[in-house]
Image (cartoon, coloured by chain):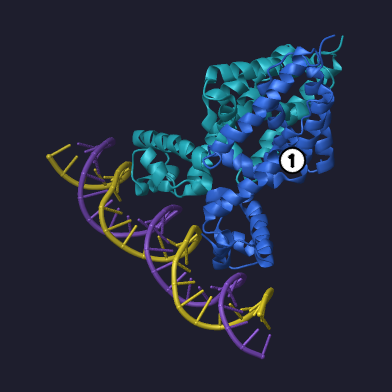
Chain colours: A cyan, B blue, C purple, D yellow
Amino acid sequence: MARAAETRRRTRIQVEKEGQILSSALDVFAQSGFAGATLDDIATGAGMSKPNLIYYFDSKEEVYRAVLGRTLETWLEPLAALDPGGEPLAEIRGYIQRKLEMSRDRPQESRLFAGEILAGAPLIRDVLEGELKDLVDEKVALIRRWIAAGKLAPHDPYHLIFALWATTQHYADFDAQVRAVLGRESDEATRYAGAERFMEEVILRGLRPDT
Amino acid sequence: MARAAETRRRTRIQVEKEGQILSSALDVFAQSGFAGATLDDIATGAGMSKPNLIYYFDSKEEVYRAVLGRTLETWLEPLAALDPGGEPLAEIRGYIQRKLEMSRDRPQESRLFAGEILAGAPLIRDVLEGELKDLVDEKVALIRRWIAAGKLAPHDPYHLIFALWATTQHYADFDAQVRAVLGRESDEATRYAGAERFMEEVILRGLRPDT
DNA sequence: TCTGACCTTGACCAATTGGTCAAAAACTAG
DNA sequence: CTAGTTTTTGACCAATTGGTCAAGGTCAGA
């Protein structure tokens, strides 16, 4: 284990350097994937030498795990924030907005997860089957209650969540494709405004109960 | 250049071996990405030695390009099949079905593209900005005509296409996550049936004109 | 069957890269 | 200021891996 991990109290330098490493590692892993990333790239991005990086994290995989772990909580936040006490359609609209904001403002995190899951989620399978599944199951139950109360049209909540994930994250994960198709003219703000408008007009509208 | 490429007439063995290589390469690249894949893995999967593989393709990148290229046409097919002469809602329903079928039956191709685009599409940017953009622009114009004719509700066709891509491909690209969330019970057939039902009930319904 | 072209691979090479180590530099408590 | 601890890195090592090469095996046509 690295000193940083076994020492009881973390020094000022440890906190700083670990932060720089994780920040650089996020960029590199998101851009190149786990296999494509090199410790030298990460170290350079963090403004230090490779042995110095290894002084803080014992291995490339440990850096990767740390970045993933750090991002996970941020990632689950929007869904967790879905409020049972709120008005159903407004809550889901809020969720869409938060997810789109995350895609826009933190695309690296989105791509990091996309890469991990694309590869079969070898390192976070347990988190997906545990924390994530529990959270989703809880929100699915909530949506079912909203449906039973006649506040939402009756559609499978699991597939609703998948559709929201897929569509919102698409703009970060497949950014290269979206930009290519929309052409040079389209700027970021316009892209995301259009995405939000479409989702609210089509998906949200599809959730409105018949009455 | 490899013999296979410069020879005028391809021998029986060339056709066979190149097919085996591309098939194996699809699996390996889809699973491990470009950087994570090794020529030995691909060669072994194709039932031959690494030098033998290099006899047919000059480099790892050339194998990768070949696999990407081969898959591209298949990939554009469903969108290209959108028929101007057909009934708008039925056409889009057919498109959703075809894309979901591709996700289910050819997940490796889906993941291959996802990986490439996630990395910024370094090798197919020109195709995305050329062929793909042209095809999308053409279909966007078609959808706009349908909207103008009052056959579809007025929503941005670009974002409609993105939403359909995102949602259908999600089931292949993020398979690990979908399975984890739905749990062990859910089998493939049920997953895809649920996805199709949701998309038809929500998205397709959202495209129906008001009248 | 013979011959020339095609196919196959074991052995090898050089570059990359994850990780080690010892020694020096910087920091901090007393 | 001093001694001990923490931090930093140049040099190095071993494993992996993309790609080469020469030698031997196989195949198709005459």
Q: Residue at x 70, y 35 (%)?
A: B170
Left/right placement of residue B65 relative to residue B174 reads left
Q: Residue at x 45, y 37 (%)?
A: A22
Amino acid type, residue under disc 1 in the picture? Ser
Whether residue A9 is visible, yes or no, is no
Q: Residue at x 74, y 25 (%)?
A: A139
In the picture, which quadrant includes the C terminus of chain A?
top right
Which residue is disc 1 drawn over?
Answer: B103
- Report the chain holding disc 1: B
Q: Residues within 10 Å of mark 1 (few under 14, many from 20)?
A: many
> Depth check: A178 or B14 in front?
B14
Hey, which quadrant is residue A150 in on the image?
top right
Where residue B150 appears, as percent x and y from the top left, is 80, 12
Hey, which quadrant is residue A118 in on the image?
top right
> Depth check: A8 or B102 in front?
B102
Where residue B8 appears, as percent x and y from the top left, is 60, 61
Left/right placement of residue B164 relative to residue B53 reads right
Where residue A176 appears, as percent x and y from the top left, is 55, 32
- Give the vertical position of A137 relative to D2 (above or below): above
Q: Secondary structure at mark 1?
A: helix
Where residue A101 appears, as percent x and y from the top left, is 57, 21
